[in-house]
Amino acid sequence: MRARSAIVASGLVCELREVVLRDKPAALLDASPKATVPVLVEPDGTVIEQSLDIMLWALRQNDPDAWLPSSVGKVSAMNRLITDCDESFKFHLDRYKYPQRYGNVDRQVHRGHAALWLHELDAVLTRRSFLCGEKFTMADAAIAPFVRQFAHTDLDWFDIQRWPALRTWLLRWTQSTLFDGIMKKYPPWMEGQTPVLFPG
Ligand SMILES: N[C@@H](CCC(=O)N[C@@H](CS)C(=O)NCC(=O)O)C(=O)O
């Protein structure tokens, strides 16, 4: 979702190869043995295998909506938010979602830790409409997919939390045309098929 968002925002068009994670094609493993998605292969064969790097790759070429921060201070603010998301929130989110994959940890404990950060985000979003200001930027696009995952793990619980600003922010994103564009489903890629373009 991160990579697709930035590609849509940049106006670039890529060939998209949808991968089913339990049946990874050899071409993915050849390009990127670490075998996670997304992976972007540039025309010269350079492989980019981190979602954030793919976002930067796209937005540094073209950023018509100014998703990238415009000052050093804003870069640090964005990096701090994304690092908190990827290093701490995601750790607890994974254990809240899949306690059995982590030795049957207590999912409520991890939900509690993750929720502390969501309280902080709600406080930020009470002061401004989006994470880094009054417009949607890379920080929102990078973080919203994980907040949505958290919400959908137990929607009834999420909905009764006192996070009005966070909920409004999430809803604005899930009701956007950007969200529709990145959620479009594609059949799994097969060797030799006609290339599928994204956005298509
Ligand atoms: N840090 C990587 C994480 C990528 C990642 O973990 N992707 C998941 C899917 S969202 C994956 O490919 N998992 C491998 C698997 O389930 O086999 C990034 O942001 O690109």
Image (tube, rainbow, N blue to C red):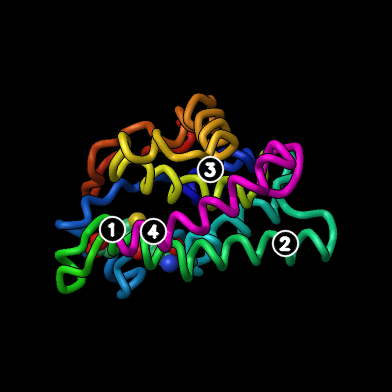
Spatial CA distance of label 3 from label 4 is 29 Å
Quarter of the image for residue 180 reads: top left
Question: Circles 4 and 1: CB distance less than 8 Å?
Answer: yes
Most frequent secondary structure within the magenta stretch: helix
Residue position marked by numbered label 4 in the rendering: 112
Residue position marked by numbered label 1 in the rendering: 108
Residue 115 visible, this angle: yes
**Horizontal and vertical percent position of residue 77:** 72, 62
Residue position marked by numbered label 3 in the rendering: 5
**Horizontal and vertical percent position of residue 99:** 20, 63
The residue carrying pointer 3 sits among few (fewer than 14), some (14 to 19) or many (20 or more) residues within 10 Å by Cα, namely many
Residue position marked by numbered label 2 in the rendering: 77
Query: Label 1 sits on what residue type?
Result: Gln
Q: Is residue 117 magenta?
A: yes
* Mark 4 or mark 2: whose residue is earlier in sequence: 2
Residue 159 is left or right of residue 132, and the answer is left
Give the position of the C terminus as an image quadrant: top left
Residue 137 is left or right of residue 16, and the answer is right
Residue 43 visible, this angle: no
Query: Label 4 sits on what residue type?
Result: Gly
In this orientation, which residue lies closer to the viewer: 41 or 180? 180
Query: Label 2 sits on what residue type?
Result: Ala
**Horizontal and vertical percent position of residue 136:** 67, 39
In this orientation, which residue lies closer to the viewer: 121 or 141? 121
The magenta region covers 108-135
**Horizontal and vertical percent position of residue 78:** 68, 59
In this orientation, which residue lies closer to the viewer: 126 or 29? 126
